[in-house]
């Protein structure tokens, strides 16, 4: 791999992560509150125990964002992989795989017993990527497909994006 190794980010990386996440949404035509707003939120979130990020490169070229919560079925916590993004020109070079490897190593030492990911059904490339890394959308006890339901209780970000 010709890229720097992934590392656990700090709150000092918040602005760089905000820019990447804004680029992620812009690439996929999804509304974003803008890199600056995301960066401000991330300063706060990354300073607490409930969220961490993995970052690659200087300037940053890939990021994973993970929120952590307790769960009654595990002694440890459950991590939700909120975002995983590699800039388009650096994909298919093993960077996403290296991030997942660090995520699994970091989870082993920080008492995360399971990792969840929400993926759109039609995103077959991302589904193949995660399945190759051991993730499944099939409930092990029943063999049924797991569905993700949600209901927004606040207004979504305004249409259009800003930097
Ligand atoms: C999904 C995503 C994070 C994967 O990151 P990536 O860095 O491209 O992933 P990898 O390079 O580790 O693996 C991707 C492919 O490259 C191949 N690959 C892995 N290591 C490689 C290497 N060293 N050299 C060449 N190819 C490699 C893998 O076999 C894989 O092939 P596949 O198409 O059969 O799955 C990235 O494509 C991305 O940011 N996509 C847009 C955002 C997105 O969909 N995020 C996930 C939302 S849930």
Image (cartoon, rainbow, N blue to C red):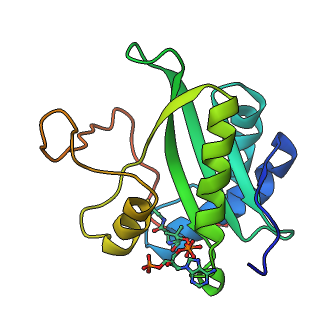
Using the rendered image of the protein, determine whether residue 161 is visible from the camera's viewpoint. no
Q: Position of residue 8 (x, y in %)?
A: 77, 47
Q: Position of residue 123 (x, y in %)?
A: 32, 70
| 115 vs 40, nearest the viewer | 115
- Residue at left offset 78%, top offset 31%: 47
Work out whether 75 lies above or below 156: above
Q: Quadrant of residue 155?
A: top left
- Residue at left offset 26%, top offset 50%: 137
Q: Residue furthest bottom?
A: 89
- Residue at left offset 43%, top offset 72%: 29
Q: Quadrant of the C terminus?
A: bottom right
The number of numbered badges drawn on the structure is: 0
Q: Position of residue 37 (x, y in %)?
A: 67, 49
Q: Quadrant of the N terminus?
A: bottom right
| 91 vs 36, nearest the viewer | 91
- Residue at left offset 63%, top offset 47%: 103
Using the rendered image of the protein, determine whether residue 139 is visible from the camera's viewpoint. yes
Q: Quadrant of residue 92?
A: bottom right
Horizontal side, residue 16 vs residue 84: left or right? right
Work out whether 94 lies above or below 118: below
Horizontal side, residue 22 vs residue 121: left or right? right
Horizontal side, residue 107 vs residue 147: left or right? right
Q: Position of residue 95 (x, y in %)?
A: 65, 70
Work out whether 92 lies above or below 43: below
């Amino acid at each position: 791999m010709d890229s720097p190794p992934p590392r656990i980010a700090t709150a000092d990386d918040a602005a760089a992560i905000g820019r990447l996440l804004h680029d992620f949404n812009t690439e996929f035509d999804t509304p974003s509150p803008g890199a600056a707003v995301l960066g401000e939120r991330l300063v706060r979130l990354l300073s607490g125990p409930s969220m961490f990020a993995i970052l690659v490169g200087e300037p940053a070229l890939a990021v994973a964002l993970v929120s952590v919560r307790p769960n009654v079925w595990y002694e440890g916590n459950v991590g939700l992989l909120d975002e995983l993004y590699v800039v388009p020109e650096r994909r298919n070079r093993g960077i996403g795989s290296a991030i997942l490897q660090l995520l699994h190593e970091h989870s082993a030492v920080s008492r995360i017993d399971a990792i969840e990911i929400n993926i759109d059904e039609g995103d077959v490339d991302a589904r193949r990527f995660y399945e190759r890394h051991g993730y499944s959308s099939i409930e092990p006890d029943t063999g049924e497909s797991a569905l993700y339901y949600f209901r927004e209780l606040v207004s979504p970000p305004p249409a259009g994006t800003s930097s």
